[in-house]
Amino acid sequence: MSESTLPRHVAIIMDGNGRWAKQRLLPRAAGHKAGVEAVRQVIKACVEKKIEILTLFAFSSENWRRPVQEVNYLMDLFVSALEHEAKKLHEQNIKLSFIGDRSRFTEKLRHYMLDAERLTADNTGLIVVIAVNYGGQWDICEAMRQLAVEIEEGRLTSQQLSPQHIEDRLTTAHLPPPDLFIRTSGEQRISNFLLWQLAYSELYFTNVFWPDFGAEELEKALAFYTNRERRFGYTSDQLKV
């Protein structure tokens, strides 16, 4: 598998922590903790494969509906992970960034997120994007809100509006769209993740729960990707010309 055939940008819905724990008669918190180790393994594998961007769906805007105890644990786990992992990522030349609405998070968590971004801002290796309190519909709505203001102020007209205007105002405007989308645990939904950005992504679904998704499973997903013909609306014959 050559680097030229690998995706530049991989996006993952890390699903199945709770079911992984339930199978082992463990509390759901144990599944989330095991999921953090899987994140470490996948980041390591992406660095080794020289993948440029890894986007991880850590907490959706709908996840607030979960039991309060579980949400609180996830927030504490997030803070703990940032405390212990940001420096390690920096030492590996990894750049860390976050997308999503940060307004619902505590001041402490927002502080850790901003510190991690500042610490790794100049790194030139793998870019790890963490989607937290993120929803694809929210992302598009925020882009449209910005455009509405520009139209109201006379800086843009409705006739000038194009898909590129929207794309340039999404939280991922600084990144290429994902080439490969992965969802673990057997669910086959996008679940309001990167709705605009996944328009031409290759979609890979696996029954493996996230805590068991490591380098070997990532390799399977990458092998699936390399066997896909990405046409972007063209025919196979056109691509051969």
Image: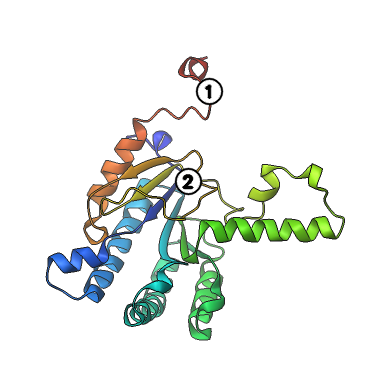
> Is residue 31 found left or right of 23 in the rendered image?
right
Which of 109 and 141 lies nearest the eye of the viewer? 141
Residue picked out by circle 1: 234
Q: Residue at x 41, y 79 (%)?
A: 79
Tell me the SS state at disc 2: loop
Q: Which quadrant of the figure has residue 201?
A: top left
Q: Residue at x 53, y 69 (%)?
A: 117
Give the mark nearer the N terminus: 2 vs 1. Answer: 2
The amino acid at mark 2 is: Pro
Residue 129: image location, x then y, percent: 48, 60
Tell me the SS state at disc 1: loop
- Badge 1 crowding class, 10 Å Cα cut-off, few under 14, some 14 to 19, many 20 or more, is few
- Badge 2 crowding class, 10 Å Cα cut-off, few under 14, some 14 to 19, many 20 or more, is many
Which of 65 and 15 lies nearest the eye of the viewer? 65
How far apart in space, not on screen, are marks 2 and 1 (Cα)? Answer: 19 Å
Q: Which quadrant of the figure has residue 121?
A: bottom right
- Colour scheme employed for the rendering of this structure: rainbow
Residue picked out by circle 2: 178
Q: Residue at x 19, y 63 (%)?
A: 20
CB contact under 8 Å: marks 2 and 1: no
Q: Residue at x 21, y 64 (%)?
A: 19
> Is residue 136 found left or right of 4 in the rendered image?
right
Which of 15 and 52 lies nearest the eye of the viewer? 15
Residue 39: image location, x then y, percent: 32, 62
> Is residue 153 found left or right of 122 in the rendered image?
right
User: Which mark's residue is nearer the viewer, 2 or 1?
Assistant: 1
Residue 213: image location, x then y, percent: 25, 55
The amino acid at mark 1 is: Tyr
